Image (tube, helix red, strand yellow):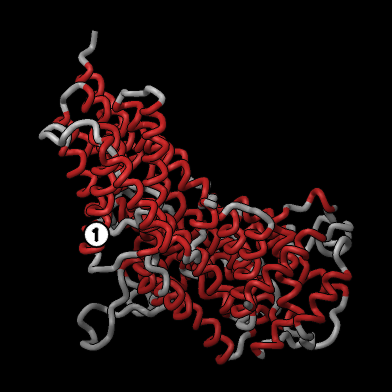
Amino acid sequence: MMSVLLRPASRATLIILPLICLWLVLTYSSASKVPPGESTVIFAFLAAVCPLLTAYLRVQPDKWRIESPYLGACAAAMGPFWAVGAAIAGRLGASAVRGGRLRWQSELEDLLLIGVSLSACHVLALLGVQSSSALSLFFVLFWRGSYFLLRRKASGSAAAIFVPAGIGMALGGLAEAGAGLWSAAGLLPCALMALSAREEQLGERRSRETLQALALMLQRAHPYTHAHIERVARIAERTALHLGLSTDRAVLVHEAARLHDIGKIAVDEEILDKPGSLTADEYAHVKLHAPFGAAILEEIEELRSISDWIRAHHERPDGNGYPRGLTDSQIPLEAKIIAVADAFDAMTGGFESNDHRPYRQPISPEEALAEMERCAGTQFDCAVVAAFRCALREERA
Amino acid sequence: MVEPVVFWLSLLGAFSAGLAYYRFVVFPAHLDSRLEGAIRAFGRAVELRFPNHAGLTEMVVRLARRVGTRIGLGPKRLRELEQAARLRDIGLCAIPYRLVNRRQWNEWSPSEAATYDCHAEVGGAILETIPSLSRHSETVRCHHAPFVPPGSAPFSRVPPVEARILKACAEFVWHSRYLGHEAAIHHLEQGAGTLYDPHIAREVLRLARGTEGPA
């Protein structure tokens, strides 16, 4: 049910979420442990202030929720009513800092997760756990852990879960020791988390720019490839998701698919654009684009995993592919996905967008799918072809 | 026995220290290495397209760095100069494969030479679209532009010093490889003050002759 509710396009979330929040507030407000005093009200205040900091620094808060330690301490020391109130206040404040832009769907989904984490926390309290530090730790681990689990995001998730959880535990401990006011010291690590998140975003932006620049170089060398690689990238990512790969992995497949022909920078454009069949020498020259592409991407540390996929994107399960003649189990799944998406677009590319290749007349998507199913098991992986068919149907819907 | 407040505050301090180390030490180094990797990838792409350019970039980088040091560029500008040296030929991806790989450069017609010369402009245009590298676009665009003495023509742009260094170094390395060391020195001497910044040309000549003396 959770995965249905959290699916980005789910409209059910918008109806069910407020009801769950209302239920939570009504059920648990009586469970608030202590009336808010000066030593504990600071948790709610700072939990509401932290999102303003992320908004001010223009950090996308999805991965690093820097308010999570304070929300954890607030939930543990003051109860769920205050935690939900602080979370809502923080989001509204952040949206005001961003100029009124509130990403309703993702914010509501996140509030739903907070509600569920609070329920889990309450169950733990009913089981006899009374320590604020333990409850705070549990809350943050549950909330952030379930976020990464449901979004199937893997990259950097451990740090983004355990660091706020540890800080939350310390804040809960301070509340327990009756030194809630000292918890303002927690702002320092929270601010550092926000700054780290901003740096991470900068790094990701630079990576994207690098990929964009490489794609632009290829486009300069071979103009027709641009639309092709964009289409291949889109459908390859969708196919990866259908095959059960994580969101991060699917995004990586998208990037790899955008760069799968990068080695063509080093291929003679007159041979690539030659109408008619190629001589053996010319074909051998064209085949070099796979290892060339891998050699270019190997220079970039975070793209080394991609380089293997690029090298293998013309390998075939029956071992008749190139450059190394790998067989089924030796070919990375991601390379098989790119191979299918690439072949489909090469067969149909010009059919819709009139940028077909000079050496091949386009065929209809139905004919291309039939051809790919005929070649499943020899040229293409059977499971990938099946997932590709679903992805294509979804893309057209 | 440690007071609970002290213990929890120490834990917060430890988290702060770890995060500060990550933010101010680990991450900047990681970003730098990412950028260097990207720049190397661009260079690799050009060298794969035009194998006869293999090794030229590294020679230009080394020479430009030595010249930059001698004319007093600081460490940060030297790093920028190195990056620009590696990126300077990124526009070669737009030059026809056969023009460079199947023909000798001294057989080119004027129009073919003009096509080749476009690579600086194309490289500058590509870099302009990449925010993290756009600061190099002017240097790359001007790295084959002839020397314009400051103040000589009121409306002409004076290429940045990095571009003047790259022009002298890249063309010296190119001529050394294809015409020989002595001919390259002669070409640089002849062009100093017209094609090349005389101050920079003098430093390149000193390094080329091994008479550089103290920087």
Q: Amino acid at mark 1?
A: Leu
Note whether A172 is above or below A336 in the view shown: above
* Picture coordinates of residue B4, whole percent (x, y): 23, 17
Residue designated by label 1 = A92
| Residue under the image location 46 percent in, 69 percent down | B88
Give the image quarter of residue B162.
Answer: bottom left
Q: Residue furthest left?
A: A38
Quadrant of the drawing holding the C terminus of chain A: bottom right
* Picture coordinates of residue A361, whole percent (x, y): 79, 88
Observer able to see residue B2: yes
Looking at the image, which is closer to me, A234 or A7?
A: A7
| Residue under the image location 74 percent in, 58 percent down | A312
Label 1 residue SS: helix
Looking at the image, which is closer to me, A168 or B190?
A: A168
**Label 1, residues with CA under 10 Å away: few <14, some 14-19, many ≥20:** some
| Residue under the image location 52 percent in, 61 percent down | B57
* Picture coordinates of residue A374, whole percent (x, y): 88, 70
Instruction: From the viewer's perspective, tell me whether residue A62 is left or right of residue B77.
Output: right
